[in-house]
Amino acid sequence: MEDYALKAVEQLTTRPAEPYDTFTLTPITPVLGAEITGLDLSQELTPQQENELTHAFRAYHVLVFRDQDLTPEEHKRFAGVFGALHPVALAPEGSDPHILDIKATKESKQVAGNGWHSDGTADAEPSLGSMLYLTTIPEGGSGGDTLFANMHLALDLLSPALRGFLETLTAVHDGALPWTAAGQTPPPEYDVPRTEHPVVVRHPENGRPLLFVNAPYTSHIPQLSRAESDALLEMLYAHIARTPLLHCRVRWQERTLVFWDNRSVQHHAVWDYYPHTREGRRVAIDGTALHA
Ligand code: SIN
């Protein structure tokens, strides 16, 4: 590994363990994710619990909570601790406007999130994070894991020369892209979000730079020719997908809630359990505009 990459990894692996008083935190890997025990999310949290969770979220980016009995209202209340709830686009008539049902069955031909991406990056104020609570996991108890990749470290592992170039660029994120990729057009009632963000942004809360492009939503880099833009984006996506050092993998149990940061990480929901059913509820939290 190059010296700059070793240094980036070392910064994460040698960080001092944080003293959390209100829960126990166990890292998933040295570079990403943590399991939190000792909290009942169906209860209102104390200010100290909220502060410590916010701190852990900024440091570990993916927080996993096991054995939680949560109603949809309790799920939303917990998400609301971190920001305003983001409305579900094209929510079905009569459904909760802030809860997205995540469901795959033997009738499914595709599932949500089966590829590296972040939620809501085409929005002018991209999502702070998402909270997914699974109520049904695939029969047999394995399958349906979610992978996460650390976008701060993805940037840090690139050479200073490439990183310097990326810092001069922006990228267009287009909410219509997932529709056109599936051979469809967005319905007329969908106010399609489309935003140009810097390719390297500074995280609004932890202050660390990160790589902010993702395959389903990023259409192109306007400063480059289409061929150059496609080649550069493909190279970055391959770097994200093929560098296991960036990744952690969450194995679900029923009644697990996972809270991830849509700026600091990308995620990939693995569909390796067909024809079994996997089901849950996702709440997304509003973020703020992103700057270089
Ligand atoms: C998503 O992409 O938000 C869904 C993640 C998952 O089902 O694990």
Image (cartoon, grey):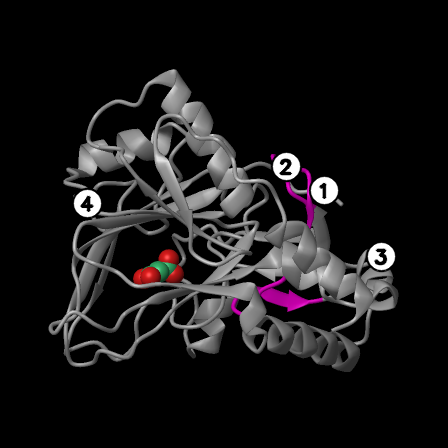
Q: CA distance from mark 1 to mark 4?
A: 34 Å
The residue that mark 2 highlights is: 204
Q: Is residue 228 above or below residue 67?
A: below
* Residue 144 image offset from top left, x and y in percent: 27, 70
The residue that mark 4 highlights is: 95
Which part of the image, by quadrant, shows the N terminus? bottom right
Secondary structure category for the residue under label 3: loop
Of labels 4 and 3, earlier in sequence is 4
* Residue 23 image offset from top left, x and y in percent: 34, 32
Of labels 3 and 2, earlier in sequence is 3
**Magenta stretch: dominant secondary structure:** loop
Q: Within the magenta stretch, is there residue 222?
A: no
- Asked if residue 13 shows in the view, the reply is yes
- Tell me the amino acid under the disc marked 4: Ser
Mark 4 Cα-neighbour bin, 10 Å: few <14, some 14–19, many ≥20: few
- Quarter of the rendered structure image containing ligand 1: bottom left
The circle drawn on residue 168 is 3
